[in-house]
Amino acid sequence: MTSTLHSHRFAGSFFALFLLCALPCATWSAEPNQQAAKNQKAQQEPAQKGEGEGKAPFDPSTAKDAGVGMPTPYDKFIALDQLLTKTKVNWQQIFRKVAVDIDPDAFTDKDVAVPMILGVRIADGVMAIKAKDAELLNKCAADIEKLAKKLGVSDADLGRARAVRAAANKGEWLKVFMELGFFQQDIMKKIDEPEHATHGTLLIVTGWMQGARYTTTVVDENYSPETSNLLREPLLAKALKEKIESLPANLQSSPLVAKLRDVLPQIEKILNVARDGAIAKEDVEQLNKLATDAVKAAMGASS
């Protein structure tokens, strides 16, 4: 799974089906007709022996960090469905087992706790769509709206929350999927503004933690080397760790941030397995525990 995405492309990250639409168009040369002819010729003629041998290999040192966008567990849900054809996953049961139950009005710490819980509820919203549970999705959408308002997101930016709930109540799940993605993109655009930069970091990290709780729960209940490999993304864990470590000093003193600093290096170590290896079942259980510890710490910060 790609570990560096622009926050502005959160909707692209959320909509795996639409990623191709977001790819930039190729830049044409000053001689488009000649270029088109070359492309057509290349398609018609087989590659010659040794062709392209002069092309330089990929140099990781020249890669640029595009930042970390909001990771979504939805692609893993799809992959798990494809792997677990004999034991169909009961996504509604998984949702009810993992989703948090909060009172958004109880959270007052706008610097740390509110953005963290917002990230958790966004992940819950993604899961509610997979579970096709309108009742629980309505609750998620309402909580997301209230939490986002605490961070200064305006009513105008939250208009899609009503569209999400309306579509869910009608059972229009494709529309729900689209509207929730756009809704969260609206929130991320607001939080991506300079004055909300730290909010975005905390939202992204805890959203990923809650998504990890869902995926590790399913993998643990249906363990195999193949399912465990769906969890392997050490570069993303490293990027999230570095984002937390780069938070300003006044936030580093928060017990909630300290918890994230504690668990992320442990998670990165577990996820960093050989390409042909697998994550052991006991490590999957440990991943779930670490992510749960971080989420529950945020939930306990409501006073």
Image (cartoon, rainbow, N blue to C red):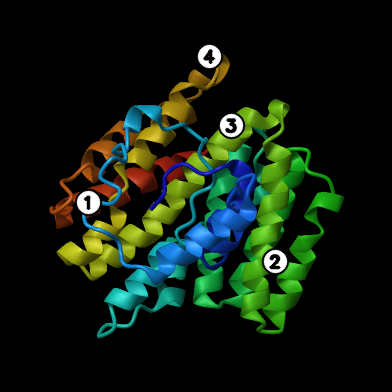
Residue bearing the label numbered 4: 249
**Which badge, 4 or 1, comes first in the chain's sequence?**
1
Residue bearing the label numbered 1: 50
Q: Quadrant of residue 21?
A: bottom right
Asked if marks 4 and 3 touch (Cβ < 8 Å), the reply is: no
Give the farthest residue toward the top: 249
Q: What amino acid type should be assigned to the residue bearing mark 2?
A: Glu
Q: Nearer the viewer, mark 2 or mark 4?
A: 2
- Measured as percent of width and height from the top left, residue 141 is found at 68, 61
Q: What amino acid type should be assigned to the residue bearing mark 1?
A: Gly
Residue bearing the label numbered 3: 112
Query: CA separation, marks 2 and 3?
Result: 27 Å
Q: Nearer the viewer, mark 1 or mark 2?
A: 1
Q: What amino acid type should be assigned to the residue bearing mark 3?
A: Val
Within-10-Å neighbours for mark 2: few <14, some 14–19, many 20+:
many
Query: CA separation, marks 4 and 1?
Result: 55 Å
Residue bearing the label numbered 2: 179
Within-10-Å neighbours for mark 1: few <14, some 14–19, many 20+:
few
Quarter of the figure that contains the C terminus = top right
